Amino acid sequence: MRLVELYESSTTDEIRLAIDDIMSMMLSKGVKEMATDRFLSLLGKRGFILSPEELIQAADSSQMVTSVDREKITTSDQMDVDQSVEAPVDVGDMAADQAMKDIKK
């Protein structure tokens, strides 16, 4: 992979993450749609200066975007939460439990 391709791939991922972040903030505030110009302004504040066409192309890879055009961008109805993630484990408690079991033997 060439350096230019690596940079473009990294930038594309960063743009997608910024889009998802703004979309999740919209969802948390109950906002279902926003003017594309306003959305582009928010991306610009994060350092991503995009044209509406570039936004439309980048938003296609986001699962949080239902639709986007030159007028407005619309969020999906719900956030994509990974249900396969397990709750964090307290290793200290596990070690203490195991130590107590070993003592009782």
Image (cartoon, rainbow, N blue to C red):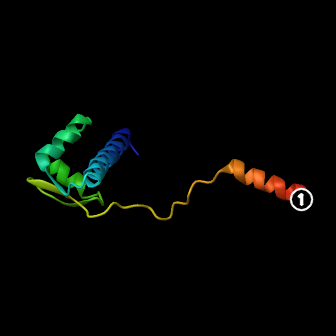
Q: Residue at x 89, y 55 (%)?
A: 103
Report which quarter residue 80 is drawn in: bottom left
Q: Residue at x 26, y 36 (%)?
A: 46
Q: Helix or strand or loop: what does disc 1 sit on?
A: helix
Query: Which of these two is toward me, 30 or 19?
Result: 30
Give the percent coordinates (x, y) of residue 71.
8, 53
Q: Residue at x 16, y 39 (%)?
A: 41
Give the percent coordinates (x, y) of residue 51.
14, 44
Up/down of 41 relative to 32, above or below: above
Within 10 Å of disc 1 (Cα), the crowding (few <14, some 14-19, many 20+) is few
Give the percent coordinates (x, y) of residue 30.
24, 55
- Name the residue at the right extreme: 105
Q: In the drawing, does residue 77 fall left or right of residue 69?
A: right
Up/down of 64 relative to 5, above or below: below
Q: In the drawing, does residue 75 fall left or right of residue 86?
A: left
Residue under numbered circle 1: 104
Give the percent coordinates (x, y) of residue 9.
34, 46
Query: Which of these two is toward me, 67 or 60?
Result: 67
Q: Residue at x 24, y 38 (%)?
A: 48
Q: Could you tell me which quadrant the C terminus lies in? A: bottom right
Count of labels in the image = 1
Amino acid type at mark 1: Lys
